[in-house]
Amino acid sequence: MQRWSEEVARDPRSLAFLPLARAYRKQGLRDASLHLCLRGLEAHPAHVEGHGLLAMLYLDDGDHERAADEWSMVLRVDTNNFEALRGMGFCYLEQDRLSKARQMLERAALLRPSDPTVQEALRVLGTRQEIVEKGLSSSADPAFGDDPWAVPTGEPVFMFDAGTEAENAGQQASSPAPEAMPPAAAPVSRPPPAVPITGPLPLDPTLLFDDLLNAGPLLAALLVDVNGMVLAGRLTEGVRGDPAVLGAVLGGAIGEATRTAHHLVLGVWRGILLDSEHAMLHLAPAGSDAVMVLAARRDAPAGWVLRASTHAVGQARQFMEEYA
Amino acid sequence: MNELFIAAVERLSRVAGVRGALLVEGETGVTVISDLREGVNETAVAALAASLFRRTAAASETADFGRLNTLQLEADDGHVVAVDAGELILVVVAEHDAQLGLVRYEAHRAAESLS
Amino acid sequence: MRGAELPQLVDALRGPIQVFVRESRVRIALLVSGAGQVLAQHGFARGYHVMNVASLAAATHASSHALAGLAGAGRWEHLYHGGRERQLFLAPLRTPVGELILVVIFDADSSLGIVRLFYENLEKEVSALPAFQDRNAKTDHGSFERDLEAGLEYTSPEAASED
């Protein structure tokens, strides 16, 4: 942060404004982040990520209108920006502009078919359209009340998580999430099934572990070969980074673990649990030439991560057999 | 300081299921202090555990997960737990059926007492 | 072991040294005679003046040996130099036909602890090589050097022609 800060102080046009503003937001320094972001956008008015961050800052304040303005700016520059499409979809949904909301959310769903927040928004949208078609006003629906962002009791929550925007990479946001949205720590951790789910595998290998990724505090689930190449899986929405990089750097640990277990006469290694500053990681061999990498939020229970890994390894083996 | 190291390592070695503990220099993988049961190869444990720790720590930082605090290697016939202790690494070798939660807890306590 | 048998000696050492290089992840390992001649080289030798490294290693070995004697330290185990980018490890490797010098250069992929560990393994493997079991271990230093000279052309023609 100090480096970015010095850079911005030295050159107000520096693009370091973005990581610094993100860091400020993460620390709950909302005003400083907003100020920095606005100043940065003065110098770089078409900076997509800058507008995206500004939208999140407005959203943090519950100012959905301004957030939507910023996302529309993003979409002018980058018509396929997932975050902006999703955000705009939510804003339109909030305003009961249902056809516009569907347009945005369906485009977002095309980009990331497995995103649970988009799927959930589309479901809510469907419910509302049904109500409208039956001649009832959506605002009359007691389940939604006055605030269309509010989630009715018993409804699955929107996982539109202001705290897990790209830069957070597994950290919880220190700034409070909007009231109607669940805070970053809120996602429900369902225990992973004890045995792997058998059945048809998804055609898209990136979706292979989506049952886990959508269920709990996971940031990433990747199947990586001995050369560090990603075979299947993905990072969760909002996690910064490139799965290929994650696979490559962690894949290198396979040989190290094998060597250690062998020379310490510990037999076959079954896993490595890494407790890092921002995340908990688990690596487990999946067959003789691949490793399963799970990354979870720092506060994830270690036991849950271990079980999730066992489950994922089962899926990975099935995948490897199928596509061998 | 030396006595502190010895006390921390000895305390850890007494935990049920622990085959030994040692303090290793992170950079070189050379033992500083150890208390190991007979049959445990000190040179090997120190060098290999430190190497595994260094490599995964570098991977963790490269992947933006931050500094590595604890590593736990699970294998068929035992476990290795390594905890960051500044420039040193505290390494514990445990039996397969050791209470890993307790081992990890004691290792963290010992590492904290050193920093 | 006579000069004509030197190729067998180097052949017998090739496997264990290759394992050493692979397991310890060092950049290069040289097997050098007391006279500074390269008997074998493994790893990424390009970029190093192998002959110069070997000569200096032999000189270091000799002076360390003498120093250890003067200091009453007995036989030296190994020498280590930790540089910022590269690290150097020198160790005597006893074979039934005499003492050779193992010169190892490594970087952050390895560590002193790892090199020491696999050097210990190498020593054990070398001493257990079947090729050495039936040899007379009492070859004196002079005859060993002569044997080396005789066999050098086979093992390292380049080195022999440079001398």
Image (cartoon, coloured by chain):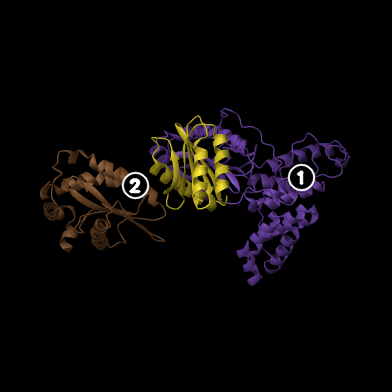
Chain colours: A purple, B yellow, C brown
Marks 2 and 1 sit apart, C-alpha to C-alpha, by: 54 Å
Question: Please, which chain is the residue tagged with disc 2 on?
Answer: C
Q: Which mark is residue C83?
A: none
Q: Residue at x 18, y 38 (%)?
A: C133
Question: Please, which chain is the residue tagged with disc 1 on?
Answer: A
Q: Is residue B70 visible?
A: yes
Q: Is residue B113 left or right of residue C45?
A: right
Of C2 and B43, the residue lying toward us = B43
- Work out which quarter of the rendered image holds the C terminus of chain C and state it: bottom left
Tag 1: residue type? Met
Q: Is residue C77 left or right of residue A136?
A: left
Q: Which mark is residue C22?
A: 2
- Characterize the local packing of mark 1: few (<14), some (14-19) or many (20 or more) Cα atoms within 10 angstroms: many
The mark lying in front, picked from 2 and 1, is 2
Q: Is residue A299 left or right of residue B70?
A: right
Residue B16 appears at what percent x and percent y? 52, 31
Q: Which residue is mark 1?
A: A181
Mark 2 in CB contact with mark 1 (< 8 angstroms): no
Residue A247 appears at what percent x and percent y? 51, 46
Q: Residue furthest bottom?
A: A10
Q: Is residue B8 left or right of residue A299?
A: left
Of A255 and A205, the residue lying toward us = A255
Residue B85 appears at what percent x and percent y? 53, 49
Asked where in the image residue A114 lies, by quadrant, the reply is: top right
Of A231 and A255, the residue lying toward us = A255
Residue C139 appears at what percent x and percent y? 13, 48
Element carrying mark 1: loop
- For residue C61, above or below residue A314: below
Image mark count:
2
Q: Residue at x 81, y 39 (%)?
A: A128
